[in-house]
Amino acid sequence: MKSIGIVRKIDELGRIVLPMELRNKFGIEEKTELEIYVDGASIILRKHEPNCTFCGNTKNLYEYKGKLICEKCLEKLNDVKEKVD
């Protein structure tokens, strides 16, 4: 991980401001969703990328009842013939 030499303080509500240079570089605008990960002693921010509920694929997604399903998994679901009671 590379340090960019910018230090920010956390405010009384636990917020930090991402520097404009980083927001511009990564295309982070107002309302952009970020995911927060922990890796050992590091906190990682990543732009949220919607993915398939079943396989995690991020391409060719369809929404059904609030869930995202990729084209391949949708085809597999269409092949299901047996009804479970």
Image: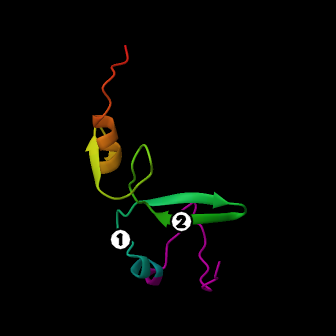
Question: Where is residue 51 shown, x and y percent of the image?
Answer: 40, 53
Q: Which residues are magenta?
A: 1-21
Q: Is residue 19 magenta?
A: yes
- Name the quadrant containing residue 5: bottom right
- Badge 1 marks a residue whose secondary structure is loop
Question: Where is residue 42 shown, x and y percent of the image?
Answer: 67, 65
Q: Earlier in the sequence, mark 1 or mark 2?
A: 1
Question: Where is residue 74 shown, x and y percent of the image?
Answer: 30, 42
Q: Residues within 10 Å of mark 2 (few under 14, many from 20)?
A: few
Q: How is the image coloured?
A: rainbow
Front-most of residues 22 and 15: 22
Query: At 39% across and 72% down in the image, what residue appears?
Result: 28
Query: At 60% across and 85% down in the image, what residue appears?
Result: 4
Residue on which disc 2 sits = 45
Which amino acid type corresponds to the residue marked 1 in the rendered image?
Glu
- Say if residue 9 shows up in the picture: yes
Q: Residues within 10 Å of mark 1 (few under 14, many from 20)?
A: few
Q: Is residue 25 above or below residue 12?
A: below
Q: Is residue 66 above or below residue 47?
A: above
Which amino acid type corresponds to the residue marked 2 in the rendered image?
Leu
Residue on which disc 1 sits = 29
- Badge 2 marks a residue whose secondary structure is strand
Query: At 43% across and 43% down in the image, what residue appears?
Result: 54
Quarter of the rendering occupied by the C terminus: top left
Q: Is residue 16 magenta?
A: yes
Magenta span main SS = loop
- CA–CA distance between discs 1 and 2? 14 Å
Front-most of residues 28 and 66: 66
Mark seen at residue 47: none
